[in-house]
Image (cartoon, grey):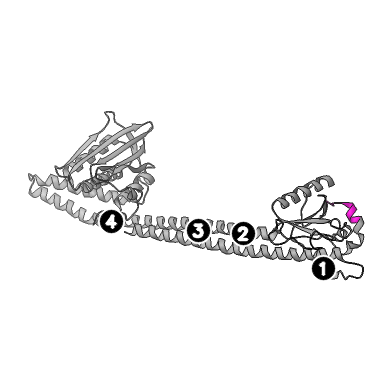
Amino acid sequence: MWVYSIRQVKIVLVLAAVIIAVASLIVSQVLVSDLKEEEHTRMEIWAAAMRSLNNADETTDLSLVLSVLNSNNTIPVIVIGKDGKVQTFRNIEINAKNEADSTSFLASTAKYLENAGRVIKIYLSGSPSEPGDFPEEGASETTETVSSEAGEDAINVKEASAAGVDAGNGKDASAASLATADAGDYINVCYDDSLMLRRLQSYPYVQLGVVMLFVVIAIFALLTSKRAEQNKVWVGLSKETAHQLGTPISSLMAWQEVLKETYPDDELIPEMDKDIKRLQLIADRFSKIGSLPELEPSSINSVMSHVVEYMNRRTSNKVEMIYDFPEEDIMVNINPQLFEWVIENLCKNAVDAMEGVGTITLRIRRENSNCAIEVSDTGKGIRRKDISNVFKPGFTTKKRGWGLGLSLAKRIIEEYHKGKIYVKESEVGKGTTFRIICQVAE
C-alpha cells in the first residue's frame, strides 16, 4: 500500500540524512585535526625562534627571528618562568580592573593549560641534556609557544622584564628578556587553540543544526501542502458526488409519485420512499463536506438510536446490536447528519471486521463537560503497528477498500466538531473499540 511506500521513503531519507551528517562530521574533524597539527608546527618554529633569540650575541642578525616571533597574531600564549610568575603573554583578552587581577587571571589560565598538557618547556642557557633542546617525543609536555611584541621593544629588555604584566593591551616584557636568565633556567610556554580553530570545531554542529532546521521546515511545508491538496480533492469529490446524485434522486421522486397515483395501496412504495430519503440524506452529507457545517444542540441518544435502527435493517440476524445508553438525555453540539455518518461508518467497518457474524456494542457516557461515545465489535482486531495508520487516507485492510472512511470520520469529528476520535483498544482476534469525545451543550 502507498502508506507503507511513503513510510519507506521517509526511512530512506532519514538514513541518507544521518549518513550525510556523519560524513560531514568526519570530514570536518579531519580538517580540524590537520589545522591543529599545522598550528602545532607553527608553534614549534616559534619556539625555535625564541631559542635562537636567547642564544644570540651582538653579531647575530635577529631580523628573521623577530619576524617569526611577531608573526603569531592568532594563537593565545602565556609564558611563565621557572618560579611560576607570568613573564609575557599574547593574543589573550583580559577583563580585569587592576594589574593584580590580570596577573591572577593569567596565572590561573596558564595553570589550566599546563594541566591540559598544552605546554612547551624551553631551556634558556642549557639543560640537563643538550642546551636549548625540546622535550623528547612522548614526553608529557607538548610543543607550542608565543612571542610578545619583540622587535622594537627588544632594546628595552630589562625594563620590560621588570615591568611585569600589562593587563591593558596584552603586551609586556619582550621575549628578548629571556636572554638574561641564569644557566639551566627555563620557561614554560602555555598555549591554547586559536579563535579560528575553535570556530572551525563548532562550525560542523552549527551547520548540521541549520540543515536539520531547514529539513524540518521543508517537511512541515510539504505536509501542509499535501494536506491542503487532499482537502481540495475531498471537497471537489464530495460536491461532485452530491451533484451527480441530485439528478437520479429527482427522477426517482417523480416516479415514486407516479407509482403512488397508480398503485396507492402497494406496500413497497413506503419502503421505496425510505430509500429515496436515505439517498437524499447521503447527498446532503456530501454537499456539507468542505464547508463549515452548522452545529446545534442535539440529543446524542436520539442520534445513536437512529443509527441502531438503520443498522438493524441493513444487517443480518447474525449481527447483534447492543446499546448501552444512559436514561437521561445528553445534549451535545453536533451536526446530526454528519455525526450519524461517522457512527454508521464505524458500525459498517465493524460488520466487515466480524465478517457478518458477531456483536456490536454502542455506549454513551457523560464525563464532566464531555460526552464519550464508544463503538466496540468482536471482529478480527487491528494489529498494533497499524493502529497509528487507521485514520490516514488510503490505509485499508480490505481487498476492495479505498481507505477514506475513517479518514473522513476523523476530519468530521476533529475539524468540524472540535472533538477527538481514536482507537481506545484493539486486540487481534478479539475486537476493537473506537472512542469519540465531544463537548456537551451548555
Q: Is residue 111 magenta?
A: no
Residue 161 can be seen in this image: yes
Measuring from the top left, give residue 403's x and y in whole percent: 30, 54
Mark 3: few, some, or many residues within 10 Å (few <14, many ≥20)?
Answer: few
Q: Which mark's residue is nearer the viewer, 2 or 3?
A: 2
> Looking at the rendered structure, which numbered label has been put on residue 67?
1
Q: Which mark's residue is nearer the viewer, 3 or 1?
A: 1
Mark 2: few, some, or many residues within 10 Å (few <14, many ≥20)?
Answer: some
Measuring from the top left, give residue 54's x and y in whole percent: 85, 63
Q: Earlier in the sequence, mark 3 or mark 1?
A: 1
Q: Which residue is identified by label 4?
A: 402
Q: Which mark's residue is nearer the viewer, 4 or 2?
A: 2
Q: Which mark's residue is nearer the viewer, 4 or 3?
A: 3
The part of the chain drawn in magenta is: 159-168
Q: Earlier in the sequence, mark 4 or mark 3?
A: 3
Q: Which residue is identified by label 2?
A: 203
Residue at image position (51%, 63%) is: 20
Q: Earlier in the sequence, mark 4 or mark 2?
A: 2
